Image (spheres, rainbow, N blue to C red):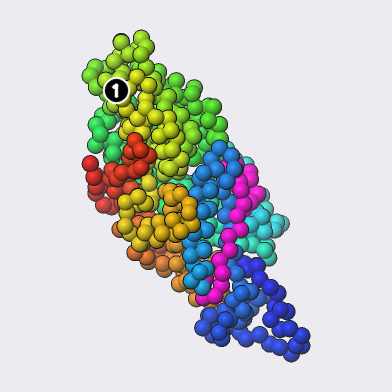
Amino acid sequence: MGILRAAPLLVLIGCSTDFTPQTCSVDSDCGNGLVCELRDTTPVCVHAADATLVIGESAPISGTNQALGTGMKLGIELAFDEQNAKGGIRGRQLSLDFRDDAYQPNLAEANARSLTDAQTVQSAPRCPSSNAMIGTNAPVSDTALQRGPNAVLALLGSVGTPTMLRAAPVAVETGTLYFGAFTGATTVLRDTTCAACSKYIFNVRASYAQEARATMELFKKKGVADYTRIISFDQNDTYGDAGYNGLVQAYTDVMGQAPGGSGIVRFRYTRNDDTSVPAQATAAETYLANLLNTTTGTITVGVMMTDTYGAGGDFIMALRTWQFANDSQQTSLMKATRLKLYFSNVSFVGPNALSDKLVAAGTVPNATIPFTQDVVVSQVVPNYQSDTSDVVTQYNSLIAAKGAKPGFTSLEGYVSARVFIAGLLAHQGPFTPDSLVTTFEALPDLSLGIGATSGFSSMNHQYSQSVWGTAINPDGSFRNLYFWSAGIPIQFFE
């Protein structure tokens, strides 16, 4: 199976008919400017210029949620350009083969097949995720898939849960690394869905379940009393399910079991269709009005939002506008004074795009508060506006030099690529997905400053276990609210 898009061996031997390429085990076995790579399954010394490491990415840079893919791609490119300027991976250059999937699952699967050069084999799939129906999706393949000669080494920084559920099975079935996806979903990435094939999956960010746990602890601190005072606003697909399931488990862990099972009410919008939001906002307003009508005193409600920036911004603005509207309910329910709303979005929302949308909307009608009031994002990377860790400092320097606007999503792309590059630098011998699995499993905490429990092992394929809670200020900047990490008590900053 090929992993490098390089010149054929004939380029190395010229016109000689008796030339025997030098065999090797690691790069140091070769001379200056040469590296050890596979050619026709044999490890031989080749020119580093002929051993480019091609990495694939599928993400949306068009459509409703294009800011998410644009940000991840930018962050990865910053890291690749930085490492290439340092000489690459012992002379090998890093190249990103990017494909736009518009946040559409079918396009994400097609991109994964193309990037892995997937070849159909008439035998049973080796990975259970290939021919399983995951969620409402049909199986990816009823037959085995293998890596073709033009396959990339890894898929890095894929964006989204519904898209991941179509792309990741292709990657693992073909024996290709699936690294640093921009999703905190459990299914496929963090469970046993792929069985032994899960060895090819490495996550960098914290999970949605961990973000939900941090969010629940925040809601408890703000005074949310029970499950009736919690609302889930989520995307009507596997992404929304991942967030909601995490919320229900977090409620059980922090507050206790809700009567009748999940108990927490949810309002769901359609992926890539922000016009589906108003109806869900109206339904949520009815729910809140009923709470006010059947109780006395002040009511504190936490809204966990497993969303994207367009839909999320519309929902927040609709509820705030309703809360302060001068209508008959204002007189009967006193919703402006009795209702306290806290909105917490998961990191996938696109924090900077959400902030821009709310700031542009200005002040809530009939009120003196901005639409950013009490809007939180649970981040899986530190606050680039205030953090001074190595990885954030370097990111800010690189993005300033590029003349681009910094943001949490591109920072996540940069962090994921930095961890990936660290594995490449640590690796000895020819680069193959299988040999890299062992290298990544030995990768320790790189001291990047992204949490106290960082690192991979053979039993742990998630690098970071930390969540940073940030609130959006009226001017669109972000301030730190809390830091949460698995096994460590949550720390509140205000």
Three-letter amino acid code at the position of disc 1: Leu
Residue sitting at the far bottom: 18
Q: Nearer the viewer, residue 449 or 352?
A: 352
Which quarter of the image is occupied by the N terminus?
bottom right
Q: How many marks?
A: 1
> Image height check: is 243 above or below 464?
above
> Image height check: is 255 above or below 39?
above
Q: In this view, does 119 lie to the left or right of 298?
A: right
Q: In this view, does 15 lie to the left or right of 436?
A: right
**Residue occupying image coordinates x 30% and y 20%:** 336
Which quarter of the image is occupied by the C terminus?
top left
**Residue occupying image coordinates x 63% and y 43%:** 106
> Image height check: is 80 above or below 68?
below
Residue wearing tag 1: 339
> What is the secondary structure assignment of the residue under circle 1?
strand
Q: Nearer the viewer, residue 403 or 208?
A: 403
Q: Does the magenta stretch include residue 92?
A: yes
* Residue 405 locus on image (x, y percent): 46, 49
Q: Does the magenta stretch include residue 258?
A: no
Q: Can residue 463 be seen in this view?
A: no
* Residue 291 locus on image (x, y percent): 32, 19
Q: Can residue 113 be seen in this view?
A: yes
Q: How crowded is mark 1: few (under 14 residues within 10 Å), some or many (20 or more)?
A: some
Q: Is residue 257 left or right of residue 125?
A: left
User: In this picture, which residue range is highlighted in magenta?
Assistant: 88-112
> Image height check: is 200 above or below 17?
above
